[in-house]
Image: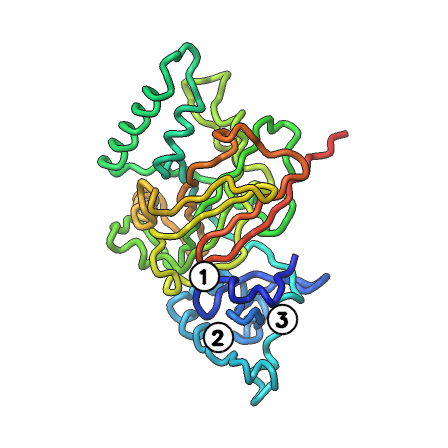
Amino acid sequence: MSVKPEAASALFAGRFALATLSAPDGPAFPALVTAGARVRDLRAAFGDEHLTVRGLLEAWDTALPRLSALAAADTDADADTGADGAGAQYRPLADFRVHAPVAPRQVFQSGANYRQHVIDLHVAHRAPGDDRPEEERRAEAAEIMDRRAAEDLPYVFLGLPSAITGPYDDVVLPAWAEKPDWELELAAVIGRPAHRVSVEEALEHVAGYTIANDLTDRATVFRRDMPQIGTDWLRSKNAPGFTPLGPWIVPAESVADPGDLRLVLRLNGETMQDESTKDMIFDVARMVSYASQSARLLPGDVVLTGSPAGNGMHRGRLLRDGDVMDGSITGLGAQRTRCVAEVTR
């Protein structure tokens, strides 16, 4: 799927973003996308035919100034006239297919990080024999959230890179998934290795931000055969295509405040999620710092920061064949994914 040039002003915040694109029947390549909806192939600009977006992130300290200079050279005059050859390096974004912007080695996922969302899930997942009124169970969940925030213990686990798909690709709903659900999330993209970094240092390791939809089959979140084990994130979250990512990586310097972004997900045009990252229990810095205490975060890795209230489990309306999800985050663009039921034989 391509992006219409007339929608350029709504693509993303700042002068440029990174993307992985391909021409029809051509290989994917790292691209600089300008606010004017023009594209430059960064393999040629950096003189490396094997360059990827992850490669750029691995050299982020030196790559960022070069990317900024390339974007600055893309003036309207150059693009329209090809003056001194600068504009000739750019092509319309609408000519290309948009893929997931990066291929991470590690995907760090987060659960229970939006206050209202967790309260809603707590109420929806009523334990057998729990006949307490909803008001009492909501109060219990609120108390748990307050305690978690005070103890500073985010809930982070690992996802599979093979679950990632493009921001406009169809999502196949596995035949075994009884309760597939949406979870729009802000994703931080790592640009510098991070291991045991403090909260104060954490954002220095974030190159930029993108959009993720962390699909989850609610029916398989908990192991019914072995309840003492608890959650089964492999089964419930990692089917192929269950993590639409992108369309862009917007540099962190263009995102004024990741703690004040609006996330909106619409299902077939109806708003389901509409919340600010202000509702996060743990902000991006705390999430990155926490994950780095156990793991070494690598350039290109993505840290998903949790999803706000309004999921399908709470709405009583889960995903099915033909559904279309439109997700957007302030300054990061928008993605559109269509659900397709798996064809079994």
What residue is rendered at 58% in x and 80% in y?
79
Q: Quadrant of residue 293?
A: top left
Q: Of the residues under marks 1 and 3, which one precedes in the sequence?
A: 3
- Residue tagged by mark 2? 71
Q: Of the residues under marks 3 and 2, which one precedes in the sequence?
A: 2
**Lateral position of residue 33 relative to residue 195, left or right:** right
Quick one: SS at disc 3?
strand
Give the amino acid at mark 1.
Val
**Lateral position of residue 167 relative to residue 280, left or right:** right
Residue 75 x %, y %:
51, 81
Residue 290 x %, y %:
31, 43
What residue is rendered at 57% in x and 64% in y?
7
The outermost residue toward the left is 150
What residue is rendered at 32% in x and 26% in y?
141
- Residue tagged by mark 3? 92
Give the amino acid at mark 3.
Pro
Q: Of the residues under marks 2 and 1, which one precedes in the sequence?
A: 2
- Residue tagged by mark 1? 250
The outermost residue toward the top is 129
191 or 93: which is nearer to us?
Answer: 93
Screen quadrant of the C terminus: top right
Q: Is residue 235 visible?
A: no
Residue 29 x %, y %:
59, 64
**Lateral position of residue 248 relative to residue 199, left or right:** right
As measured in the structure, the alpha-carbon distance from the residue carrying label 2 to the one carrying label 1 is: 13 Å
27 or 115: which is nearer to us?
Answer: 115
Screen quadrant of the N terminus: bottom right
233 or 330: which is nearer to us?
Answer: 330
Q: Is residue 221 visible?
A: yes
